[in-house]
Image (cartoon, helix red, strand yellow):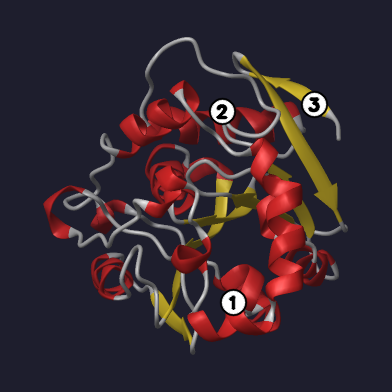
Amino acid sequence: MPKISAGELEVNYQIKGAGDPLLLVIGLSFSLLDWGTAFPELLAQHYKVILFDNRDAGETSQSTYPYTIAQMADDAASLLIALGEPKAHVFGVSMGGMIAQHFALNHADKLNKLILGCTAAGGTCSEFGDASGLLTGNILPLLFTPEFTRDHQTDLTKLLQMTTPFHSQGGTLQRQLQAMHTHDTCNLLSKITAPTLVITGDRDPVIPPQNSGFLAQKIPGAQQATIKNASHGFCFSHPNDTASALINFLQHP
């Protein structure tokens, strides 16, 4: 996959499809491979889908110092500039949804519509579940319902074999975790001006659904969608439902 200089980073990215740009921002530790293939391909039938690795993940540059979620939003803005894209729709999941919130606050001129997936405002207004499995490598219970894991063992084994080598670990993971602790938009959400969709799985144990309810309540005019029988990894487990919700939101005023 190609890399491009964006700000101080060499960013690993991939582009699928054509049309209005849609930037996908992945979550903690993960690389662009963790979107799987089905979900990006569905979106690419309608949009120019831009996937990339955050700093300290995948094949993008490692950082040499601690940083904030706001700085990771600056990275995303720098990538759009480097790619010659003046504006884009932005969809961020989990930590990527935190990055997307700061993108909306600090780079509103580069944002068309905003989609926040399975994420939270941080600070004291959020409730987080147990994500310790990320540190132990036991991530399937975090991402998928027991039923989905049972019924898709082969596919999930292949996914992990492909993606795990590109996950953050050690110092890179610690820096991303430290960045997450800088995230607090509790009192800033009312300043988001972009049309916004908040979407989550109804069985998310990592960032429980009530966090999405708070975001939708505080962001002016925000819409809300819930993927039924879905956990934190609903983009992979429910690609058709998720893509349909996004496309419907993006195509209608």
Left/right placement of residue 5 relative to residue 69 reads right
Question: On screen, 192 above or below 52?
Answer: below
**CA distance for labels 1 and 3:** 33 Å
Where residue 127 appears, as percent x and y from the top left, is 20, 62
Dot 3 falls on a residue whose secondary structure is strand
Where residue 228 appears, as percent x and y from the top left, is 49, 89
Identified by mark 1, the residue type is Thr
**Nearer-the-camera pick, 229 or 47:** 229
**CA distance for labels 3 and 2:** 12 Å
Mark 2 or mark 1: which comes first in sequence?
2
Left/right placement of residue 210 relative to residue 81 reads left
Identified by mark 2, the residue type is Arg
- For label 1, the residue is 149
Mark 3 or mark 2: which comes first in sequence?
3
Question: On screen, 232 above or below 52?
Answer: below
- For label 2, the residue is 55
Where residue 99 appears, as percent x and y from the top left, is 44, 44
- For label 3, the residue is 3
Few, some or many C-alpha atoms within 10 Å of disc 2 (few <14, some 14-19, many ≥20)? many
Identified by mark 3, the residue type is Lys
Q: Residue at x 71, y 29 (%)?
A: 59
Left/right placement of residue 153 relative to residue 29 reads right
**Which circle marks residue 2 in the picture?**
none
Question: On screen, 154 above or below 75?
Answer: below
Dot 2 falls on a residue whose secondary structure is loop
Q: Nearer the viewer, mark 1 or mark 3?
A: 1
Left/right placement of residue 176 relative to residue 169 reads left
**CA distance for labels 2 and 1:** 29 Å
Where residue 233 appears, as percent x and y from the top left, is 54, 67
Residue at the far top in the pictured view: 64
How many numbered marks have been drawn onto this rendered protein structure? 3
Q: Residue at x 76, y 55 (%)?
A: 49
